[in-house]
Image (spheres, rainbow, N blue to C red):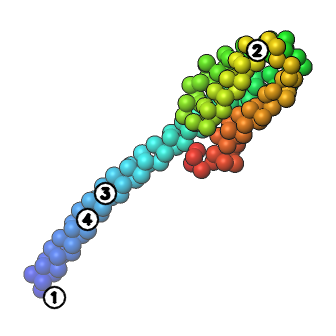
Amino acid sequence: MSRDILEAKLKFYDRFLATITALGIILGGFWGVYTYVETQHQSIQLRQRELALRVFKEKKNAYLSLIDAAGEITASKNRQEVIEKAPLFLKLYYGRAHVIAEADPNVSDMKIAFKGKLMTYLKNKEMNESPFKYFSSVSFDLTNACKSHIDPRTIESTIE
């Protein structure tokens, strides 16, 4: 082989390798940008899931407290016990449960219905009906309304 042919082949290989190297750098850059964007996307999804889980836990705590307060009123033995237990329900009604229940109209409606029954019971001093008999149906309705929003088996798809 002559020196010119050898030199031409070397130039060709040199240019070929330079082109491959440049393409490798460009593709590596694109891959780096892609992985960065994908990592950011996954990070955002993780933060959204964590936030949804935190909201779920807050909702669960508020709803369980509301259900417990309504249940205690329902399980009262007499009017005096209802009067003693009413402030806790009303505190939740106007406080944590009010803020959280606004997002769930069915819970909000049942919460309002229970409060209405409670206020009627407290105003009517001649009420002879037992607290259990008077409050049980609306208390059960409130529990069922809350259940669908705090049962992890039904809420899992929302958290994901």
Q: x, y percentage for residue 64?
A: 72, 30
Res 60 visible? no
Q: In this rendering, is residue 76 above or below 17?
A: above
Q: Between marks 4 and 3, how big is the CA–CA gap?
A: 10 Å
Dot placed on the residue nearer the N-terminal end, 2 or 1: 1
Q: Amino acid at mark 3?
A: Phe
Between circles 3 and 1, the one closer to the viewer is: 3
Relative placement, left or right, of 89 versus 28 is right
Q: Between marks 3 and 1, how big is the CA–CA gap?
A: 42 Å
Q: Which residue is found at the position 64% from the left and 21% from the top?
A: 93
Q: Residues within 10 Å of mark 3 (few under 14, many from 20)?
A: few
Image mark for residue 30: 3
Residue holding disc 1: 1
Between circles 2 and 1, the one closer to the viewer is: 2
Q: Amino acid at mark 1?
A: Met
Q: x, y percentage for residue 27?
A: 30, 61
Which picture quadrant has residue 103?
top right
22 or 59: nearer the eye?
Answer: 59
